[in-house]
Image (tube, helix red, strand yellow):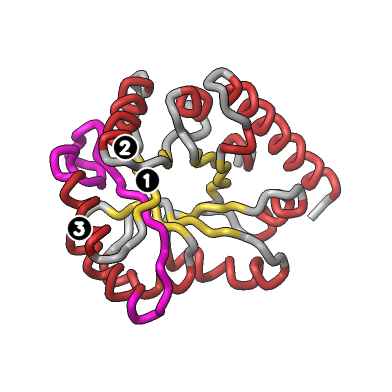
Amino acid sequence: MTTDSIEAAAARLSDIRDNIDRAASLTGRRGADINLIAISKTHEAPAIQPLIDAGQRVFGENRVQEAQGKWPALRDATPGIVLHLVGQLQSNKADDAVALFDVIHSLDRPSLLTALAKAMDKADRRIPCFIQVNIGAEAQKGGCPIADTPALIAAARAADVPVAGLMCVPPADVEPAPYFALLAKIAREEGLDRLSMGMSGDYETAIMLGATDIRVGAALFGAR
């Protein structure tokens, strides 16, 4: 790790936090109210460490197995790291996910809810979960159908699985604002405060439409 890499990571982090502050102020919020999740999927520990050194403590991974390979050592070295699972989760990985992660963003079906509830009971650990909504009704994407979302939220609450809020990934290559606005509307109707939406290319738009948790990868880690 070089001093330049630490300085470059700190500069990218500072730029993004400035952008967050500006976007939040347009909706009467503070940048500190927005949870910046650094998406570290496919990045090895040496690429992640400069961001940790720059002060970032919240990270997101797509795959349980990949996270298991790098995060235990990184967390041992730096207390206070919060780890989010933002990718699709197979039911047979529920035990591993509950053991490793602090927040799960991809609860999207009753079978996964059952697996997570059992895993949380076994571990005696309740993990906040975002309900992932298939906001663009895309067949190839994960996420709960919009019409089924209220029932899944109710089932999670009944199973004592904490519902943090709603999460979405809008369709690619179209204006994301209407999809963010729709997710915010569903969250209001369900009495949920947190919205996991917005990535490197659209997080400022997401913040202006109510995002509380943004998932930023490329803009933080730079070009590969």
Per the picture, the main secondary structure of the magenta-coloured stretch is loop
Q: Is residue 194 above or below residue 50?
A: above
Going by the image, does 117 lie left or right of 78? left
- How many numbered circles are shown? 3
Q: Is residue 114 visible?
A: yes
| Crowd tier of the residue under label 3, counting other residues whose Cα lies within 10 Å: few below 14, some 14–19, many 20 or above | some
Name the one closer to the observer, 54 or 181: 181
Residue type beneath disc 3: Ala
Disc 3: which residue: 155
Name the one closer to the observer, 71 or 166: 166
**Mark 2 or 1, nearer chain start:** 1
C-alpha span from label 3 to label 1: 14 Å
Residue type beneath disc 1: Gly
Q: Start and end of the magenta stretch?
A: 121-149
Q: Is residue 61 above or below residue 202?
A: below
Residue at image x 63%, y 60%?
81
Disc 1: which residue: 165
- The residue at the far right in this view is 3
